[in-house]
Image (cartoon, rainbow, N blue to C red):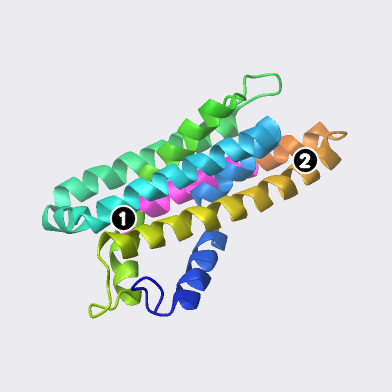
Amino acid sequence: MFFGISDYGAFVAAIVLFLAIPGPGNLALITSTSKGGIAGGLGATLGVIAGDQVLMWLAVAGVATVLATYPAAFAAVQWLGALYLAWLGWKMLSAKPGDAPVLNIRPRHYFQQAVAITLLNPKAIVFYMAFFPLFVDPQTHLGLISFGVMAATIAALTFLYGLGMTLLTHYLAERMRANPRIGRVLEKLAGIFLIGFGIKLAISK
């Protein structure tokens, strides 16, 4: 046992796997780094961490249960997230050379963008609600201390993952500066993926 967490190693491995799964958060991180460099990538990383922490503590407080009790509320949040992702993807697809970037270059905007993308993914609330019980032992659980250690672990792993992705993306972006067409193609692909994520979120049950 580690602060009331059963199989802490498996908990860490599960979080790393969850971080590596492609999704809107990863896409926002990569796009932010390609647009704003390391500062933009780190700003997005902190935004993802902040959004995850909010969702995690909301799940701990039982918000997921409330949303399940009132399906209309869950559906409204779900459609809001879907529309936001689709709108962001369309902005990327319709952008022309010379247009202002869809994501503002200033790091504080990257932070806000990543927070919004994370919070508008209601499935994450359900994930956290179903995920934590797997690693909580009722006999040794320490209440908020156990959840606090879990939250700190998720934040630390997310930061390390985000830092690694930022440095890798920045390195690759520097190699592609000489060919702007590649950057435009990647932005279009990112837009298509964001629209796809939005559609998937809208039709998922």
Q: Secondary structure at mark 1?
A: helix
Residue position for label 2:
173
The quarter of the rendered structure image containing the C terminus is: bottom left
Q: Position of residue 165 (x, y in %)?
A: 66, 51
Q: Is residue 192 left or right of residue 96?
A: left
Q: Give the quarter of the image for residue 107.
A: top right
Residue appearing at x 30%, y 68% in the figure: 130
In this view of the protein, which residue sits in the foreground, 9 or 186? 9
Quick check: is 197 in the magenta stretch?
A: yes
Q: Which mark is residue 60?
A: none
| Residue 196 in view here | yes
| Residue 85 in view here | no
Q: Is residue 202 left or right of residue 98?
A: left
Residue position for label 1:
125
Residue appearing at x 44%, y 56% in the figure: 152
Secondary structure predominantly adopted by residues drawn in magenta: helix
